[in-house]
Image (cartoon, rainbow, N blue to C red):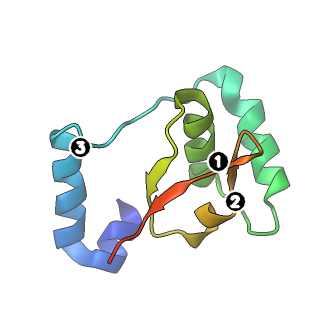
């Protein structure tokens, strides 16, 4: 939501909020046993660099099987789910 506010203003942030209310966006809670995977991903993609927020989305994709992602971050074109599968990035216009 932070990037939505700064790139798309309140209108985009409100639209994202409505997607949450309509249950069209999925949330996932990272558990402590996944912390090592987060750090491993951040190290692997340190040249991009991958931050904690990006790593949590990769881990969530690995655990849920969801590949579709709405993001303004072009790094998701490079990140791999389970080190092999690519994300299906939804283009924001």
* Residue 82 x, y percent position in the rendering: 72, 39
* Residue 18 x, y percent position in the rendering: 16, 51
Kindly identify the residue that appears in the image at 70 percent across and 51 percent down.
Answer: 80
* Residue 52 x, y percent position in the rendering: 63, 50
**Quadrant assignment for the C terminus:** bottom left
Dot 3: what SS?
Answer: helix
* Residue 64 x, y percent position in the rendering: 52, 29
Crowding around mark 2 (Cα neighbors within 10 Å: few <14, some 14 to 19, many 20+) is some
Q: Is residue 6 left or right of residue 14?
A: right
**Numbered mark located on residue 25 in the image:** none
Dot 1: what SS?
Answer: helix
Q: Which residue is mark 3?
A: 20
Q: Decide which of 64, 8 is in the foreground and name it.
A: 64
Marks 1 and 3, how far apart at CA: 21 Å
Q: Which residue is mark 1?
A: 55
Q: Is residue 12 left or right of residue 52?
A: left
Earlier residue among tags 1 and 2: 2
Crowding around mark 3 (Cα neighbors within 10 Å: few <14, some 14 to 19, many 20+) is few
Q: Is residue 92 left or right of residue 56?
A: left
**Numbered mark located on residue 50 in the image:** 2
Label pair 1/3, CB-CB below 8 angstroms: no
Quadrant in which residue 31 is drawn: top right
Earlier residue among tags 2 and 3: 3
Marks 1 and 2, how far apart at CA: 7 Å
**Quadrant assignment for the N terminus:** bottom left
Kindly identify the residue that appears in the image at 15 percent across and 41 percent down.
Answer: 22
Label pair 1/2, CB-CB below 8 angstroms: yes
Dot 2: what SS?
Answer: loop
**Relative to residue 71, is residue 18 depicted above or below?**
above
Q: Decide which of 78, 53 is in the foreground and name it.
A: 78
Earlier residue among tags 1 and 3: 3
């Amino acid at each position: 939501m932070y990037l939505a506010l700064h790139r798309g203003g309140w209108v985009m942030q409100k639209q994202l909020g409505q997607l949450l209310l309509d249950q069209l966006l999925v949330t996932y809670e990272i558990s402590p046993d996944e912390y090592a995977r987060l750090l491993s991903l951040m190290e692997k993609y340190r040249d991009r660099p991958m931050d904690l927020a990006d790593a949590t989305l990769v881990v969530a994709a690995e655990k849920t099987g969801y590949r579709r992602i709405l993001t303004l971050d072009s790094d998701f074109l490079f990140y791999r789910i389970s080190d092999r599968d690519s994300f299906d990035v939804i283009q924001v216009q």
